[in-house]
Image: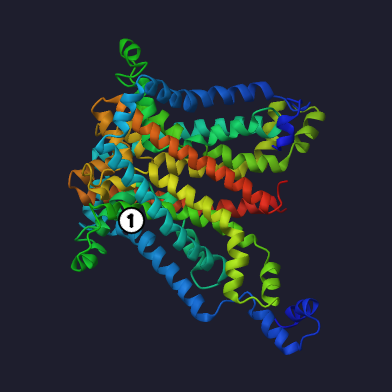
């Protein structure tokens, strides 16, 4: 504590009296105690009231009518159907985005080409589009009065108010998640390892599976984690394309809305508590993944 | 990635790495299918309206009120997040206290919590029978089912954008700068104002823009607490949904286009800010 700062401080101000030098050196980046305490207090109160309290409220309301009502709400047929649909939608859309993310990141990070910055910007675009608009665009295309609506209904294909529409809207809103985790890491890692493997005679696919994939494993999982959380929790976009048919096209967030608007508050919060739990598990896993990614960067 | 390579005549560096054509074309195909063609349908639909019709829709009393509400409250919420977000960042980066890492994780909750869950949680919290609402009711403050409720929801969802943008920048600021400033006789307050603040300013503005853009488009966490009265507490995204349910596709699209134009200009501002800060920090010529 005392020796190192003194040496450092003496480099800066060699002519000062040592005692005052030490005192000043320790104080320079330190705020007065009253300021520290008020900043910490404001932080605790603000985060407590605005973020922690709503989260606690979810669980308090979910068990407001007791544990039996809680389990009753979760085992209702409509709830189970919503859970099943949410899982199906998440598996398809996360899978699609993971695959796309790897392919796009390969093209973007392993090669130089014109318009690359534009391509990256376009991939990021869905993040700046309101979820409601993300749903709207698919209604414009595939809705009954949409551009392809008449053709689709002639051929008896249902997209809007059915699973394909929900999946499309979900893929849209989660589009950038995986690829934006992969690009910076693969950029950093360069192409030397792949080039070495290829020059030793490995095929392109083998190089990808044995070299690239292990190198980006944690970043890929990190992207998949965030993508999955959003896919399971998406409300606005899915709400526009789903049609809200309970037991059929209601995902978990939509079922929460249906129950809540039907004055079944405890049941709504019971389903909501599952989604809140998913969020908490996601956050904890995220912290673990971040540690692995940091370790991978500084071997 | 550098600007040199994109302007140079070399389209593609000669590389032994395979798969350029197939991965690039797959990327472009999938991007077009999921993002570009659907967004293009907005332009197509808008083109069906004459300029007068378009203006009629977006300047109707109800639409104007929805825009005013959405943009105004989003701006106010982003301002609050700017102030409190900075305080939170300062505490998380500069101080060591018990529970700091937990609070750091708490900041991400609005990112991770599904918006519908946040919506009903905030509504029941601020309703007159709720934990917070019952404390505010005797003071005559009504939050749930008023524009104030919308504001609370927008503060909730916007906070992580400011914190996560500013935090790494404050962490990276060279401590020698502060020491130099202090050793030259500046007071602590002057150092914060003249040395630290300019350093984090681009990040503050970026975080503000991101929080604002997110708030403008937000739907799930808002509609439960808003009350949704036309001309009083009806946000623009909700008006889009209502017009769609009435099968007025063109009206819904016109409102969406106005919102998208605002979002994209915010995106443009964010990019410009980032470039500006990189130039200032000397990371880019």
The residue at the point 73 percent across, 46 percent down is B285
Relative to A254, residue B280 above or below: below
Measuring from the top left, give residue B231's x and y in whole percent.
Answer: 23, 43
Of residues B96 and B169, the one nearer the viewer is: B169
Q: Position of residue B60 (x, y in %)?
A: 27, 34
Q: Quadrant of residue B76?
A: bottom left
Residue A80 lies in what quarter of the image?
Answer: top left
Nearest the eye: B152 or A167? B152
Q: Residue furthest front?
A: B52
On screen, residue B258 above or below B225 = above
Q: Residue at 48% of width from left, 48% of height from top?
A: B209
Q: Is residue A170 left or right of residue A246?
A: right
Secondary structure of the residue carrying numbered label 1:
helix
Q: How many marks?
A: 1
Find disc 1 in the rendering and name its residue.
B152
Q: Quadrant of the N terminus of chain B?
A: top right
In this image, A194 relative to A231: left or right? Answer: right
Residue A15, quarter of picture? bottom right
The residue nearer to you, when weighing A294 against B138, is B138
Chain of residue at mark 1: B
Label 1 crowd bin: few (<14), some (14–19), many (20+), radius 10 Å: many
Residue B199 position in % (x across, y down): 62, 60
The type of colouring in the image is: rainbow
Q: Is residue B7 left or right of residue A46?
A: right
Residue A198 visible in the shown view: yes
Residue A192 vs residue B32, the one in the foreground: B32
- Determine if residue A111 is in view: no
């Amino acid at each position: 504590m005392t020796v190192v700062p003194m040496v450092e401080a003496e480099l800066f101000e060699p002519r000062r009296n040592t005692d005052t030098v030490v005192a000043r050196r320790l104080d320079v980046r330190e705020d007065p105690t009253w300021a520290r305490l008020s900043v910490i207090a404001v932080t605790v109160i603000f985060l407590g009231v605005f973020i922690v309290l709503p989260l606690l409220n979810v669980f308090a309301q979910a068990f407001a009518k007791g544990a039996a009502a809680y389990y009753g709400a979760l085992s209702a047929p409509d709830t189970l159907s919503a859970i099943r649909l949410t899982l199906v939608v998440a598996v398809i859309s996360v899978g699609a985005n993971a695959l796309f993310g790897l392919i796009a990141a390969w093209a973007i990070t392993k090669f130089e080409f014109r318009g690359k910055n534009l391509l990256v910007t376009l991939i990021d675009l869905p993040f700046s589009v309101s979820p409601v608009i993300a749903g709207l665009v698919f209604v414009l295309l595939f809705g009954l009065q949409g551009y392809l609506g008449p053709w689709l209904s002639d051929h008896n294909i249902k997209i809007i108010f059915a699973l394909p529409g929900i999946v499309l809207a979900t893929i849209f809103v989660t589009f950038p998640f995986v690829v934006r985790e992969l690009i910076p890491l693969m950029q950093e890692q360069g192409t030397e390892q792949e080039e070495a493997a290829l020059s030793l005679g490995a095929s392109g696919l083998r190089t990808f599976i044995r070299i690239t994939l292990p190198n980006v494993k944690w970043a890929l999982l990190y992207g998949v984690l965030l993508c999955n959380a959003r896919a399971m929790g998406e409300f606005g976009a899915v709400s526009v394309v789903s049609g809200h048919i309970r037991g059929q096209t209601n995902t978990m967030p939509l079922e929460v809305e249906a129950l809540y608007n039907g004055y079944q508050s405890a049941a709504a919060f019971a389903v909501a508590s599952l989604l809140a739990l998913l969020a908490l598990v996601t956050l904890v896993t995220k912290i673990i993944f971040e540690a692995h990614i940091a370790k991978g960067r500084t071997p | 990635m550098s600007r040199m390579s994109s302007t140079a005549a070399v389209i593609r560096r000669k590389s032994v790495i395979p798969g350029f054509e197939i991965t690039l074309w797959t990327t472009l195909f999938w991007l077009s299918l999921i993002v570009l063609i659907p967004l293009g349908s907005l332009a197509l639909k808008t083109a069906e309206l004459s300029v007068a019709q378009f203006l009629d829709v977006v300047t109707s009393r109800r639409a104007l009120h929805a825009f005013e509400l959405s943009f105004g409250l989003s701006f106010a919420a982003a301002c609050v997040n700017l102030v409190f977000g900075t305080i939170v960042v300062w505490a998380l980066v500069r101080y060591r206290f018990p529970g700091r890492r937990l609070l750091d994780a708490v900041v991400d909750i609005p990112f991770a919590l599904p918006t519908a869950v946040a919506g009903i949680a905030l509504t029941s919290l601020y309703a007159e029978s709720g934990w917070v609402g019952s404390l505010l009711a005797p003071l005559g403050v009504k939050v749930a089912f008023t524009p104030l409720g919308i504001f609370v929801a927008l503060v909730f969802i916007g906070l992580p954008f400011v914190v996560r943008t500013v935090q790494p920048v404050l962490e990276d600021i060279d401590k020698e700068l502060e020491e130099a400033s202090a050793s030259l006789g500046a007071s602590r307050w002057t150092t914060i104002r003249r040395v630290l603040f300019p350093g984090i300013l681009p990040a503050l503005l970026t975080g503000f823009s991101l929080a604002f853009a997110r708030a403008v488009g937000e739907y799930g966490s808002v509609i439960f607490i808003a009350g949704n009265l036309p001309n009083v507490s009806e946000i623009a995204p909700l008006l889009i949904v209502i017009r769609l349910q009435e099968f007025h596709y063109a009206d819904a699209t016109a409102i969406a286009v106005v919102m998208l134009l605002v979002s994209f200009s915010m995106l443009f501002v964010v990019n410009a800010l980032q470039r500006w800060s990189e130039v200032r920090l000397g990371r880019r010529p």
